[in-house]
Image (cartoon, rainbow, N blue to C red):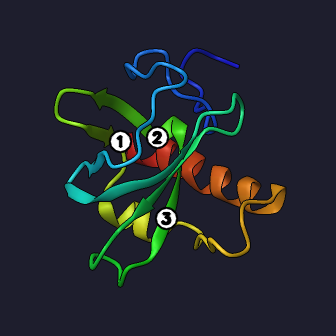
Amino acid sequence: MSMNAFDPWNYRTTAGYTQGTDLTGYKIAALDGDIGKVDEANDQTGTSSLVVDTGPWIFGRKVLLPAGVVEKVDHDDKKVYVDRTKDQIKDAPEYNSDAGVDDDYRTRLSGYYDDTYRSGM
């Protein structure tokens, strides 16, 4: 894996995230504005992700963000910055909190965000 390869399910070493830090309640800032708050955070190595409650932004839908899209964590402001636009996040494969996250969904989601990483950066 090259240094610039997108690693969807792990936090970047440059993001300022320390394993074990609870990001629940932190705001999520996309490139073009805030999209909601962290509802759940999972930081298991290789499957790290954030469940974001988007509130009224996309009709109360929750979205799952792989940790790899996190550019920076600002603990003072309790804000997580991601390097995707609102539309890129909204167009991601839909997250179903009842169904949970299985390997198939994880594969589709990481493929989607890998594509947006290449084209959007």
Question: Which circle's residue, 2 or 3, is located before the other in the chain?
Answer: 3
- Give, as a three-letter code, the residue at label 1: Asp
Q: In this orientation, which residue lies closer to the viewer: 52 or 31?
A: 52
**Alpha-carbon span between mark 1 and mark 3:** 15 Å
Quarter location, residue 88:
bottom left
**The C terminus - image quarter:** top left
Left or right, 20 with respect to 88, comes to right
**What crowding class fits label 3: few (fewer than 14 Cα within 10 Å), some (14-19), or many (20 or more)?**
many
Query: Which residue shows up at 69% across the image and 39% down it?
Result: 47
**What crowding class fits label 2: few (fewer than 14 Cα within 10 Å), some (14-19), or many (20 or more)?**
many
Query: Which residue shows up at 24% across the image and 48% down it?
Result: 31
**Which residue is tagged 1?**
83
Q: In this orientation, which residue lies closer to the viewer: 68 or 39?
A: 39
Q: Are marks 2 and 1 in contact (CB under 8 Å)?
A: yes
Element at label 1: loop
Q: In this orientation, which residue lies closer to the viewer: 95 or 87?
A: 95
**Alpha-carbon span between mark 2 and mark 1:** 6 Å
**Which residue is tagged 2?**
69
Q: Is residue 36 above or below residue 111?
A: below
Residue 22 position, x and y percent, is 45, 35
**Which residue is tagged 3?**
63
Left or right, 90 with respect to 114, comes to left
Point out which mark residue 94 bears: none
Q: Is residue 21 above or below residue 81?
A: above
